[in-house]
Amino acid sequence: MPFKPFDAGATGPGAEKKTFLLKPRGFCAGVVRAIDVVEIALQAYGAPIYVRKEIVHNRHVVDSLRNAGAIFVDELSQVPQGARTIFSAHGVSPQVRAEAAERNLRVIDATCPLVTKVHLEAVKFAREGFTIVLIGHKDHDEVVGTLGEAPGRTHLVSDVADVDALHLPDAARLCYLTQTTLSLDETRDIVARLQQRFPLIQGPPAQDICYATENRQMAVKAVAPFCQLLLVVGSRNSSNSKRLVEVCDNHGVSSFLVDDEADIDPAWLEGVHNVAVTAGASAPENLVQAVVESLRSRGFLAVEEVELIEEEVRFSLPPELVQVAGVTAISMR
């Protein structure tokens, strides 16, 4: 549905300052599930609960769970033998799973089901003898885990230049997969170049970029013609949050990533009458509301929530927690 919130020309000296609050925004189903996994584990088993890497890429969420008793580690070697350990929403490689088994860790897997989908696709293609081109960002936790499924058969590309540099042995047995939190436009260009260079390349049965990433980017595109500034609530290491900034910048609108309201630079708001606010998929709603209130205190008194699409995705809890929690599914926060 086209978004036409107001007269786009209403930006003169007497124009009302307004905030457009985009929806969907913030937590996706995979993030809700991952946070619930840590909270339920702490309630059921008590502290400490060890979590490998950040459960989701948001500093405020991690700090809150740390205060509740979760211990975040970079490597499993930092976890005591036999301890209860949670894998983050971004997934892990088979090597990490093997190490956990060797250390007799009691694992609860909070990997997002949409990330698991990509892992299973990598395993399937590798077993069928395909060379895999993985589109993603080097060193991102999700990409590291996916690469581990078929390290000898997978080549990572991050842009069109990387595609041009590829030298692959069998172009007839070639496929591509993607990280779930990429820019739709940038990924489209990379896939198009892959198809130009390797006409027989196959893709996944369904798009790997997740529904939440796509929906938030489409909302930004819809509002871009009607705002002078976009603020994206999210942490610096959140891939999907950074993509929202890029999408808006590519549409000619200034955009900034803010961890919370304290990051707002007053200079950004000079001469601005219409601000759009959204949040990456791992940013909690209380941070969004704090940003809106900060804008209100700076004269952006009118707030209009703009819903582009309704999200009703739910993911079930990991089997390790279903009996403990006494439920089979969780609700969106």
Image: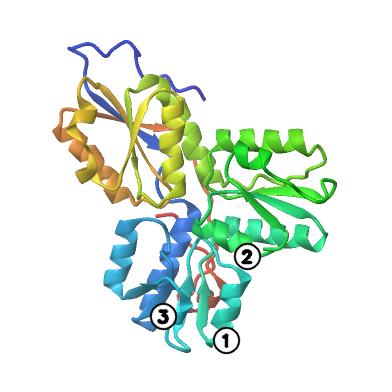
Q: Earlier in the sequence, mark 3 or mark 2?
A: 3
Residue 230 image offset from top left, x and y in percent: 34, 31
Question: Label 3, on which residue?
Answer: 78
The residue located at (67%, 42%) in the rendering is 165
The residue located at (20%, 34%) in the rendering is 295
Q: Secondary structure at mark 3?
A: helix
Q: Secondary structure at mark 1?
A: helix
The residue located at (39%, 78%) in the rendering is 49
Q: Earlier in the sequence, mark 1 or mark 3?
A: 3
Tell me which amino acid carries mark 3.
Gln
Question: Label 1, on which residue?
Answer: 102
Tell me which amino acid carries mark 1.
Glu
- Quick check: marks 2 and 1 in contact, CB under 8 Å? no
Q: Which mark is residue 148?
A: 2
The chosen color scheme is rainbow
The residue located at (54%, 81%) in the rendering is 100
What whole-number distance in Å separates the C-alpha atoms at marks 2 and 1?
18 Å
- Quick check: marks 3 and 2 in contact, CB under 8 Å? no
Q: Residues within 10 Å of mark 2 (few under 14, many from 20)?
A: some
Q: Residues within 10 Å of mark 3 (few under 14, many from 20)?
A: few
- Quick check: marks 1 and 3 in contact, CB under 8 Å? no
Residue 95 image offset from top left, x and y in percent: 60, 74
Q: Is residue 73 above or below residue 288?
A: below
Tell me which amino acid carries mark 2.
Gly
Task: Work out whether residue 200 can be spotted.
Answer: yes
Q: Where is the C terminus found, in terms of image quarters?
A: bottom left
Residue 91 image offset from top left, x and y in percent: 55, 64
Residue 66 image offset from top left, x and y in percent: 30, 70
Total marks placed: 3
Q: Secondary structure at mark 2?
A: loop
What whole-number distance in Å separates the C-alpha atoms at marks 1 and 3?
14 Å
Q: Is residue 2 above or below residue 189?
A: above
